[in-house]
Image (tube, rainbow, N blue to C red):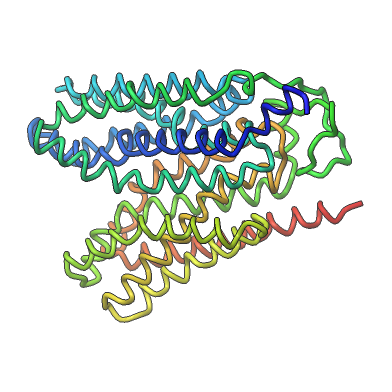
């Protein structure tokens, strides 16, 4: 094996170190840049006299920026700049969290959260999936699964940690500590683990082979599609559009539902203590779903795993709608939907190399993520508008079930298109 080839087949110890280090980075990135927001915003609003809608509008601004950034971020990783992207993203996030600790003006808060949205796009799941796929190619499934297992503990670690910091230090100093976690830990992990030798850009070819199936890997020594050329090629594939519709509708529905889940459950007659207990099951259920996929789904195709997961979600939702309002139904909903979402996160990270193409993961993944991220940003407001229309969350639940049906149909269409292509001579 040549030195170059050996670099792409690291030892087991090296692989574990690489994935575990990136996983720790995901805990810090998600925990400080995402899960800490509601706790900090609550204290900030009380001190500065700002309303919840005003403060949460800044979070929406950040999500919108994060939704627009995946394509340029992914394309930069495809060009060999994964280390620079994730290291600079951690630096940006750390600096902005510290700057947040000094803010008093609302307009500056909105401007700052646009930058935090960019930091999220440079450090969280999408870029790390691109880095792992670039390193391991078709062997990336185990790495992506492992990283999502690490990421699943972000809320478990950082929600109580952030509350502890607020209680002991106040919200402003808590933000300084959270920023220091990014500057002191994430920068070091990303700069150390993402090997520049493996970030070397690959040569591009002028035109794809018309007869090549969308998931085909180039022959040895053959150049691969990059950037805009790969995107132009893949958007002509029906499977791409099926996946785009499926994930856009799914994430819009999921984020809208989860942002309003607490008042939704209270409206349906559940006691506060039971609601909190059920919500606490979602995170562990996501991790359990990912572990189950790790153990039993290694030999299953992403098409099969995806169809099972997206079909399970409406089953859990139906339990909440149709069964009596008791804790067993509520817990079943939380566990099934949490586990399904945990698997869908992994499926989302693997559909590009396993259902579309192995070329230009970052750019294609960015294009696929763009409408889904915009849907995430608009979902909380759209769900609130739907509640206002019906004056009840019943309309929201019916819309969620209808969305689930569309997601299942769109993903199944993409899977069928992929199978037809695979069967073609």
Which quadrant would residue 326 be assigned to in this image? bottom left
Residue 79, visible in the rendered structure: no
Q: Nearer the viewer, residue 236 or 125?
A: 125
> In the picture shown, does residue 402 fall above or below 78?
below
Q: Residue at x 67, y 45 (%)?
A: 240
Which quadrant would residue 258 be assigned to in this image? bottom left
> In the picture shown, does residue 55 fall above or below 107?
below
Residue farthest right in this picture? 425
Residue 173 located left or right of residue 180: left
Residue 216 located left or right of residue 425: left
Q: Nearer the viewer, residue 57 or 141?
A: 141
Give the position of the N terminus as an image quadrant: top right
Residue 119 located left or right of residue 348: left
Residue 247 located left or right of residue 151: right
Residue 141, visible in the rendered structure: yes
Where in the figure is residue 290, as x and y percent of width and height?
Answer: 49, 55
Q: Nearer the viewer, residue 136 or 259?
A: 136
Q: Residue at x 25, y 71 (%)?
A: 268
Q: Residue at x 85, y 56 (%)?
A: 423
| Count of all numbered marks drawn on residues in the image | 0
> In the picture shown, does residue 322 fall above or below 422?
below
Where in the figure is residue 75, as x and y percent of width and height?
Answer: 60, 25
Where in the figure is residue 54, as x and y percent of width and height?
Answer: 21, 36
Q: Residue at x 21, y 65 (%)?
A: 266
Q: Nearer the viewer, residue 140 or 54?
A: 140
Where in the figure is residue 279, as x and y percent of width and height?
Answer: 28, 60
């Amino acid at each position: 094996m040549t030195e170059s080839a050996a670099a792409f087949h690291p030892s087991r110890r090296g692989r574990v170190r690489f994935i575990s280090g990136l996983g720790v980075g995901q805990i810090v990135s998600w925990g400080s840049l995402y899960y800490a927001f509601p706790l900090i915003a609550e204290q900030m609003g009380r001190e500065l006299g700002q309303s919840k809608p005003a403060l949460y509008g800044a979070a929406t601004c950040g999500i919108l920026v994060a939704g627009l950034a995946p394509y340029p971020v992914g394309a930069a990783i495809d060009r060999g700049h994964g280390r620079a992207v994730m290291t600079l993203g951690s630096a940006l996030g750390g600096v902005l969290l510290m700057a947040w600790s000094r803010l008093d003006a609302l307009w500056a808060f909105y401007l700052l959260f646009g930058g935090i949205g960019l930091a999220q796009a440079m450090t969280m799941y999408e870029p790390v999936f691109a880095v792992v796929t670039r390193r391991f190619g078709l062997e990336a499934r185990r790495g992506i699964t492992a990283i999502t297992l690490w990421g699943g503990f972000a809320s478990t670690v950082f929600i109580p940690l952030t509350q502890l910091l607020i209680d002991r230090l106040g919200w402003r100093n808590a933000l300084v500590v959270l920023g220091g976690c990014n500057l002191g830990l994430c920068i070091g992990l990303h700069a150390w683990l993402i090997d520049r030798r493996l970030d070397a850009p690959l040569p591009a070819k002028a035109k794809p082979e018309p007869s090549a199936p969308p998931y085909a890997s180039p022959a040895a020594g053959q150049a691969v599609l990059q950037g805009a050329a790969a995107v132009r090629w893949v958007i002509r594939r029906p499977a791409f559009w099926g996946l785009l519709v499926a994930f856009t509708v799914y994430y819009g529905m999921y984020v809208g539902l989860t942002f309003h889940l607490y008042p939704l459950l209270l409206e349906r007659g559940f006691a506060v203590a039971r609601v909190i207990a059920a919500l606490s099951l979602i995170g562990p259920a996501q991790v359990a779903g990912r572990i189950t996929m790790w153990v039993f789904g290694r030999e299953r195709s992403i098409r099969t795993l995806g169809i099972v997961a997206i079909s399970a979600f409406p089953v859990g939702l139906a339990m909440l709608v149709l069964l009596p309002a008791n804790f067993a139904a509520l817990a079943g909903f939380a566990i099934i939907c949490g586990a399904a979402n945990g698997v869908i996160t992994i499926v989302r990270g693997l559909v590009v190399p396993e259902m579309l193409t192995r070329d230009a993961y970052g750019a294609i993944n960015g294009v696929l993520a763009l409408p889904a991220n915009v849907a995430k940003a608009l979902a909380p407001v759209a769900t609130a508008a739907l509640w206002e229309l019906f004056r009840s969350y019943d309309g929201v639940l019916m819309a969620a079930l209808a969305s689930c049906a569309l997601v299942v149909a769109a993903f199944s269409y993409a899977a069928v298109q992929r199978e037809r292509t695979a069967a073609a001579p």
